[in-house]
Amino acid sequence: MSLLEAEIASTEEILRAEGFGSEADILRTHILLLKDEGLREQVRKRIEEEDATAESAVAEVFGSVKTRLQRSGHEITREKASDIEDLHRRLREGLDGQKREDVLSTVCDVEAPVFVTQELLVTEVLEAKDAGVKAIIAATGTPLSHAAIMAKAFGIPVLRVAGVESLREVAGSRVVVDTTNGRLILGLKDPEIEEWIEVEKTDIGGSVASPLSVYLNVVDTHASSTDKDGRIAGIGLYRSEFLLTRAEGFPTEEQQYREYRTLCREWPASPVTIRTFDVGGDKSLSFFSLGPQENPFLGLRAHRIYAYHPEILITQTKAILRAGLECGELRLLFPMIETVDDLDAVLSLVGEARAQLDAEGTPYRRDFKQGVLLEVPSILWTLQEIYDKVDFVSVGTNDLLQYHFAVDRTNGNVGHLYRPYHPTALRALAHIVESAKAASVPVTLCGEIASDPDMVPLLFGLGFSDLSVDVHAVDAVRRAVPEGSEDRFRTIANRCVSVSTAAEVSEILRNTGTSVPTVSDIEVRTTGISDGAMDPVCGMVVHQTGNPFVLESSDRTHYFCSEECMLAYQSASP
Ligand code: PEP
Ligand code: MG
């Protein structure tokens, strides 16, 4: 894999973890473009047969693809030209070694920055997100471009303004981007700007009262200070293994300590939940082999690695306990625990970490809380014993429900069977929340369903009032459960738990005017598929590469599961 591919893949993984699945898919298309054999062959030919330099070969090939796309009669196809431009720029940087000025460095130290660009590219939007950019002004592009779609998902408004060059004159001054009326207002005096800031504050949905405590899921220790105006109760899940996906080896205790301290310092009066490394499954490491795994989700993952390398957890725990001195409350969360035996093994390594800190005389957080991420179905049958040993639990529904239903959500042919609102899933969740409450053990739900405003009333009705969500979902989740609606949602959830099919749950929700969680068929069937296409006859998702059952028409190519479907299509076509 090229360096650029690896960089994009790492960003893709981060976006997925943050709940931006569709946006991560956009990056997947960039990786597929980089891998495209046709493009590679054209570049190779120019270098080998025409003696072109790598820079000029890439410029020629990408330039001609971009021109072809721009001439297309379809708007969506035309918008793909900016993806080609984006990749070309990044490849050029790698080839000539000249790093262009990125959004991040342009706006550093600016409060509420507005970024101005000629042609908005996906890379710039990603940088703008990390830099806390509040609005983007671009000269070209439509809402159909990948960059615009991504900006929308990140909540960054994009305003189209012709002739952005003239804005150079106002660089560094205060402006108002009036997104409601699509206006850019220049030359305002400070008191007028303050008035606009007041208007913005009252418009923010965050002031809505909610019976929920909403925590944040984060993957980056630096990106956690997003909002502290009382809407967010703390960090409900820091996925620490993301430290490793960009590293070249396991970070030392000191390196980890500094990372965790950054996070803890952001929340001096609030709980910070640090999950120990959940390596394996879909998260592999370039510097650490997990061995051949036919099915990584059932293989060497999380604490299972400690049987061979206990020092990984000992080092990490020492770093976390030291950093935890700086946050309001430290919660240490252990993923993928299946049984009491596995919890005991992990707790004994935590004891070893403490013993080492004590022996060294290193100060550390002694009153930390320890908890289990409930995400393997076996643990649901031993909850009482688990509650006796932990201070809190968190429910990881992403894994819990995938193992519960034995469904890979990214498989286009079965992903629709992942049904969080199915009575069997609701019963499992009800069992957890009821037993935790009876044992007076605090319970949080941190899986992706907590970020879905359509699922939240149901979760609340089941008894979950502490939810840990992706940052972009905070306001929508808070709004999903109005204050005073407790009894109503409890009654609805009880009815949903007592029926036997997903259809009955949908009906109850519809009849009671509650939002019905829908998993969009299109989304499920295409998400995460890099080489898939839908058979137009039977509707199955099938391979493109190496598929012998292919029909080309003037404007598209169709792929089929079998000769039978292909012939059926042919005979039905005029
Ligand atoms: C989960 O499984 O729900 C969870 C929070 O962990 P992850 O998505 O990182 O596996
Ligand atoms: Mg999980």
Image: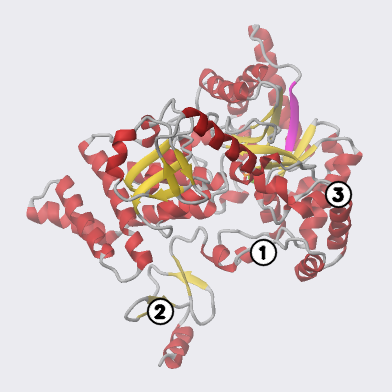
Residue 49's spot in the image, x, y percent? Answer: 9, 56
Q: Which residue is mark 3?
A: 486
> Percent from the top left, x then y, of residue 39?
25, 58
Q: Secondary structure at mark 2?
A: loop
Q: Looking at the picture, how far across and down is residue 189, in whole percent?
A: 45, 30
Residue 147 highlighted magenta (yes or no):
no
Q: Which sits earlier in the primary sequence, circle 2 or circle 3?
A: 3
Q: Callout 2 environment at 10 Å: few (<14), some (14 to 19), or many (20+)?
A: some
Q: Which mark is residue 518?
A: 1
Amino acid carrying label 2: it is Phe
Say which of marks 2 and 3 sits in front: 3
Q: Residue at x 25, y 58 (%)?
A: 66
Which circle marks residue 549 in the picture? 2
How far, Cα to Cα, is label 3 from label 1? 23 Å
Above or below residue 553? Residue 383 is above
Q: Amino acid at mark 1?
A: Thr
* Lower sequence index among marks 1 and 2: 1
Viewer-side residue, 234 vs 403: 234
